Amino acid sequence: MQKPEWLKVKVNQYQLEEMANFLKDSKLYTVCQSAHCPNIGECFGRRTATFMIMGNICTRNCRFCAVDKGKPLPVDEEEPRRIAEAARKLNLRHVVVTCVTRDDLEDGGASHFAKTISELKKIPGLTVEVLVSDFQGKEESIKTVVMAKPEIINHNLETVPRLYPEVRPMANYERSLYLLKRVKELDPSIYTKSGIMVGLGETDEEVIKVMEDLRKVDCDMMTIGQYLRPSKKHLEVKEFITPEQFEKYEKIGYEMGFKYVASGPLVRSSYNAEKGINYLKN
């Protein structure tokens, strides 16, 4: 299926390589690179990135994701310090940190998230957003991240519940909703956020039902973007959703009571994330 014009992006190769070299020298991974994000040229051009902690090998086998699967790397205890150092060098005001899913770790990597948040909080005026895995629904892991007090805790539902067996077979829709619900119960001052991809064969009604489910657990922010196939090994794109349909989803989201909605073909959960926190502040 050929990509429509609205999904075609230009990349400044020099800026891309400059940022990639900086990250390599800093010994840091990004989801921008590992997940083949279409916005990498724009974000790297603005000298921003979404840091990915605990290695670049995931313990799950989601069929939409380009991140490598297999035996994960040992956790690098110096990584939180290096991320904070990179944030200072890049003069970032809002930092997004995500991870590979680490089902091999007792706490799913929650303590490593907490250490990373703590290091970043040493930078005056910096806001922190974390995009976490589901921690297999473990209460103590959720509490550990909440107690570190990032401004935003994001956990993506990724798709509609009917497609979970095909799209993310090792995940559980209700468990993901529970995590977002518990964050709000533990600390109502933390903004919660979630996102889905469309174009995988879902219906409009199913997308709207996911939005309703998120509002029922008091989720504040939502992102909706087009699924793009990273390789022939991954799930096929069933449909390219039009920009007009994305605008409709955004309108519906605000009518439902979301505090911030980003909905568009190239929207990703951490794309232009600073815009979301600035919107909430105002």
Image (cartoon, rainbow, N blue to C red):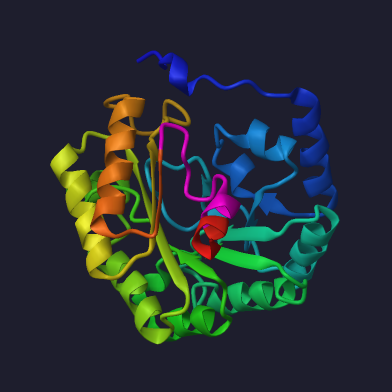
> Residue at image x 22%, y 68%?
216
> Residue at image x 30%, y 70%?
218
The one of 169 and 12 positioned closer to us in this rendering:
12
- Percent coordinates x, y for residue 277 in the rendering: 55, 59
First to last magenta residue range: 264-276
The answer to whether 112 appears left or right of 200 in the picture is right
> Residue at image x 33%, y 58%?
258
Q: State the image quarter where residue 257 is shown.
A: bottom left
Work out whether residue 212 can be spotted.
yes
Q: Looking at the figure, which quarter contains the N terminus? A: top left
Q: State the image quarter where residue 80 is shown.
A: bottom right
The one of 207 and 28 positioned closer to us in this rendering:
207
Say how many tags the image has.
Answer: 0
User: Does 249 sit above or below residue 183?
Assistant: above
Q: Residue furthest front?
A: 282
- Percent coordinates x, y for residue 136 in the rendering: 37, 72
Q: State the image quarter where residue 14 is shown.
A: top right
User: Does 259 sit above or below residue 14?
Assistant: below
- Percent coordinates x, y for residue 99 in the rendering: 56, 60
> Residue at image x 38%, y 64%?
220
Chief secondary structure of the magenta portion:
loop
The answer to whether 212 appears left or right of 5 in the picture is left
- Percent coordinates x, y for residue 275 in the rendering: 56, 50
Residue 266 on the magenta segment:
yes
Work out whether residue 237 can be spotted.
no
The one of 268 and 175 positioned closer to us in this rendering:
268
The answer to whether 149 appears left or right of 116 in the picture is left
The one of 281 and 38 positioned closer to us in this rendering:
281
